[in-house]
Amino acid sequence: MRVLLLCLLAAAAYGQVADKANARYRTAEGREGMLVTLGAPDRPDRIHAETIVKVLKIKPGQTVADIGTGAGALLNVLAPSVGEQGKVYAEDIFDDFLSAARKRHAGAKNITFVLGNEKDVKLPEGCCDVAVTVDAYHHYDYPAEMLASIHKALKPGGRFAVVDYYRRPGAMGPGGNPMEHIRIDKDAVIAEVQAHGFKLLETTDTVAGSQYIAVFTR
């Protein structure tokens, strides 16, 4: 009953929040402005990339998908973590973001860039040991379809991690407005993901009260 209630609340919150969160991404000019933030040299530190990789226990030889890679900040840590025998799929729905990520990681031999869409990550079936989406889940226009697509891309027993901000005042720091920007809070995210074939393994915070990691298994 609690899971059902949270899913209903998530559905109600979606319409009033998602459009605001995605407004800047719907035009080339808006995305160009976002790339200033997404492509900043300190972006890997700001998203706590090292902590994310540590929590997910990324190992050499694994295949990992970065869903919504943006300008590729997480790839700075993911690519070295899986090593030469591993592989990283860097997925995004915007080709201009992928172009920035390709430029940032020019010469990397273990990264494959993938143009997905709002409903499908366009990854091979059963390809990934781990999939992670960082500060992007609240942008999903079609979470049910995206979750089904991610589930399909994971190997049996593969893991999926949502890294996102709490939907509470102050969570995004100065200038941020999580009450408008973040679609649903952590408990509703967990309920939504579990309703689409995943089981929760663990949750932790990268920054207490600000950003969390929820790890699921297929």
Image (tube, rainbow, N blue to C red):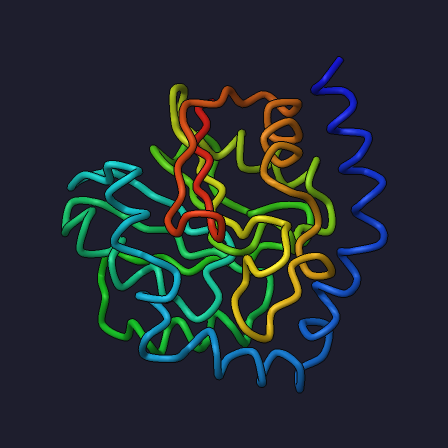
State the residue in front, 139 or 169. 169
| Coordinates of residue 58 in the picture (x, y in percent) | 24, 40
Q: What residue sits 32% from the left and 75% below the top?
A: 42
Q: Is residue 25 above or below residue 10?
A: below
Left or right? Give the position of 4 relative to 97. right
Name the residue at the top extreme.
1
Q: Quadrant of the N terminus?
A: top right
Left or right? Give the position of 39 relative to 23. left
| Coordinates of residue 125 in the picture (x, y in percent) | 48, 33
| Coordinates of residue 91 in the picture (x, y in percent) | 48, 56
Q: Is residue 15 above or below residue 178?
A: above
Q: Is residue 32 above or below residue 67?
A: below
Quarter of image, res 196: top right
Q: What residue sits 80% from the left and 45% below the top?
A: 13
Quarter of image, res 111: bottom left
Q: What residue sits 53% from the left and 30% below the top?
A: 152
| Coordinates of residue 78 in the picture (x, y in percent) | 27, 53
State the residue in front, 110 or 191. 191
